[in-house]
Amino acid sequence: MTEPRWLDPQERRLWRAYVRMQRAVEVALVRQLAESGISRTDYEVLVPLSEADDRTMRVRDLASWLGWDRSRISHQLRRMEQRGLITREDCVDDARGTMVRLTEQGYEITVTAAPGQVSTVRRVLVDLLDPREIDQLTAIAERVAAAAGYAHLPYPDNELTE
């Protein structure tokens, strides 16, 4: 077995700063969503559904988009369905498929939570950067996500996520 290519001091500093940044942003977003009565995972499901045609997506497409496995999406959707945020129905095009639809209650929660999420994202990230830095960080984030195998459909432009 070959010797690992250890991080040098500059690379270690980058990695540790990235981990702290990622955790700090996540904690801020989770705290804000708690004020709206939903979890971060609820919101991750609600937003793409709110932006989809007819607020409906095929379960496998939603799971793929989120980067979740079948078990995780199934359990999350079950919990959200029990709370009246989504409904599941058979796919008319494929008897083996299942569609997930955002309910009016789910949409209202999404619309209520979105301004706080945007405000938090601005406070802890966007407003700290100038336009050039935003472009650089975007390019870096997209490259890293692709290298990690997490290249999926981009968020469509929508007021709920901007």
Image (cartoon, helix red, strand yellow):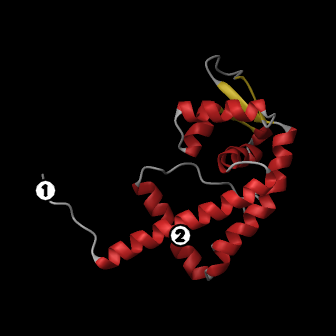
| Residue 100 visible (yes or no) | yes
Compared with 57, 112 (above or below) is below
Q: Residue at x 44, y 61 (%)?
A: 144
Q: Residue at x 70, y 60 (%)?
A: 31
Spatial separation of the CA atoms under disc 2 and disc 1: 31 Å
Residue at disc 1, secondary structure? loop
Residue 155 place in picture, x, y as percent: 64, 54
Q: Residue furthest top?
A: 95
| Residue 159 visible (yes or no) | no
Residue at disc 2, secondary structure? helix
Q: Nearer the viewer, residue 137 or 156?
A: 137
Q: Nearer the viewer, residue 78 or 127?
A: 78
Residue 80 place in picture, x, y as percent: 73, 35
Q: Which residue is mark 1?
A: 2
Compared with 44, 84 (above or below) is above
Compared with 61, 134 (above or below) is below
Q: Residue at x 77, y 46 (%)?
A: 50
Q: Nearer the viewer, residue 78 or 49?
A: 78
Q: Quadrant of residue 74?
A: top right
Q: Residue at x 70, y 33 (%)?
A: 79
Q: Which residue is mark 2?
A: 21
Residue 138 place in picture, x, y as percent: 54, 68
Q: Quadrant of the C terminus?
A: bottom right
Q: Which mark is residue 148?
A: none
Q: Are marks 2 and 1 in contact (CB under 8 Å)?
A: no
Q: Is residue 5 left or right of residue 64?
A: left
Of labels 2 and 1, earlier in sequence is 1
Which kind of residue does numbered mark 2 sit on? Met
Callout 2: 10 Å neighbours few (<14), some, many (20+)? Answer: some
Q: Is residue 34 left or right of residue 21?
A: right
Residue 42 place in picture, x, y as percent: 70, 45
Which kind of residue does numbered mark 1 sit on? Thr
